[in-house]
Amino acid sequence: MSRDRYQGSITVFLSLVGVLLIALVCALAESARIQGARAWAAAVTDMGLFSVFGEYERELLENYDVLLLDGAFGTGDFSPERVAWRMQDYMKYNTSPTEGLKKRAVNLFPMTAESCQITGYTLATDENGNAFYQQVVEGIRENLGMELLLRFQKDIQEAKRQQEAAEEYENQDASAWDNLEKVQELQKEADGEEKQADPEPVQEAPQENPLDTIKKIKEMGILGLVVKEPAGISEKRVEASGLPSNRKRNKGNLPLKETEKGLISDGIFQEYLLGHFSAWTDPWDQEGLAYQMEYILIGKNSDKENLKGVVNRLLLLREGVNLVYILSDTKMRTQIKTLALGLGGAAPVPGLCIALEAVLALAWAYAESLLDVRTLLSKGRVPPMKDASSWKLSLSNLAKVTELFDSCDDGGGTGQDYEDYLRILLFAGKKGRYPLRALDMMESSLGDQRARADGWIVRAKAETAWRFSGVFFRVTEAFLPVTSGEAPYRVTGELEY
């Protein structure tokens, strides 16, 4: 009896120890399983985000080489909840990887996604398109060589030089013509007094004044002067109030990572614009405006107005450098002085000849610039600074400048083409407006009112809530007062194109 009693005690003791050992092993296994489940939940969250971001707008990638997710999914109504629903659909399979397999397959990580929320996002239009700018510049800079970066610096210097010359021309042009008018009034008064003193003066044939012709030309429509066939100019228009740059836009709630800025970054972005948006020489033939680069520079809602704005800026650029060349050439200055003496008459009032010389130089530069711009619009080339071999208009033909237009329509020439001059205008323009205007063109080119640039996601942050069902604790539930329970867990994921 005693021996049997001891044997029973040992059996009970070993049973209790065995239960505790089993419970300990199950607890360790369950703890390891929970860690694995957490890692799996994090992976599922990341895969869900990655899958959603894989639905980027294909047409934008093909035409503009950018990755942007339409947060409205074609409905035109941007909503973070839509993105979350889409993400939850992608996560559904990965939370039950054994679903559909044989019944004997065991899922060691049973979990339930209780919620999925997009807690933060950055839109392409945020900070006036700066989010879009950052993606473009960062993506291109990685593939740039030092040679191209040095070229950007050279282009910036050239743009600055030409812009300064253009501003100087503009300042001189307004004051010189006003000054000439005042001096001419004094000359008329002097001529009237002389006529009263000598009623029978010797009649001389008046010399033709080319400035009268230039005045008339300046009053004409600029596009009719520099475009061979004005009727061929695009008549496309867009509704300005509907463009992202003008309407009230959705805004992201994540701080923008501004890693790209400065002159070199601006140069990279402008090269991107020139490489992906249409212009007068190669117009866009689908939905939206035909001259996209002209819109990015000018911002009007019609192709004609944008082309006119670019032409006026090109004309001013050429006027500035052409005037610099005229004033630097001794032979040309002598010709101007001779013509001014002839136009001033036998007894000019003080200052008349000087005023005429100034205006003649400006008028000559203007007329030559008309020929330059017409050449550029005919896909020809014009050098940044001319010399005797590339100068087209003689002073004696100043009044006949329109007769030389046909000679520009075949293009030709050497130097920079229309795109090169657009690059100069971009450097000299208001750079902060370019990203949003580029998005205007991207949105309108899709030709679908459901596609809205202020719904295009660049970066998103998601939070998922999970509940993990117990597995190994189920073994101990049979003989210990413990329950498997369900462990809550939250995962945060973030992804950026």
Image (cartoon, rainbow, N blue to C red):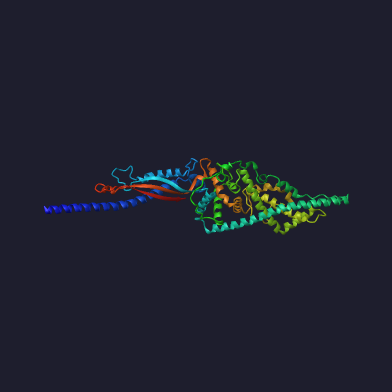
Rendered location of residue 171, percent (x, y):
69, 54
Q: What residue is shown at x 11% (from left), y 52% (from top)?
A: 1
The answer to whether any part of residue 385 appears in the image is no
Which is nearer the eye, 322 or 485? 485
The answer to whether any part of residue 297 appears in the image is yes
Which is nearer the eye, 390 or 363? 363
**Quarter residue 96 falls in:** top left
Rendered location of residue 278, percent (x, y):
57, 46
Which is nearer the eye, 24 or 331? 24
Q: How many numbered discs, if any?
A: 0
**Quarter residue 391 falls in:** bottom right
Rendered location of residue 336, percent (x, y):
75, 55
Left or right position of 33 against 308: left
Outermost residue toward the left in this view: 1
Which is nearer the eye, 186 or 246? 246
Left or right position of 222 against 97: right
In the depicted structure, whether residue 301 falls above or below residue 264: above
Rendered location of residue 408, percent (x, y):
66, 48
Left or right position of 178 against 149: right
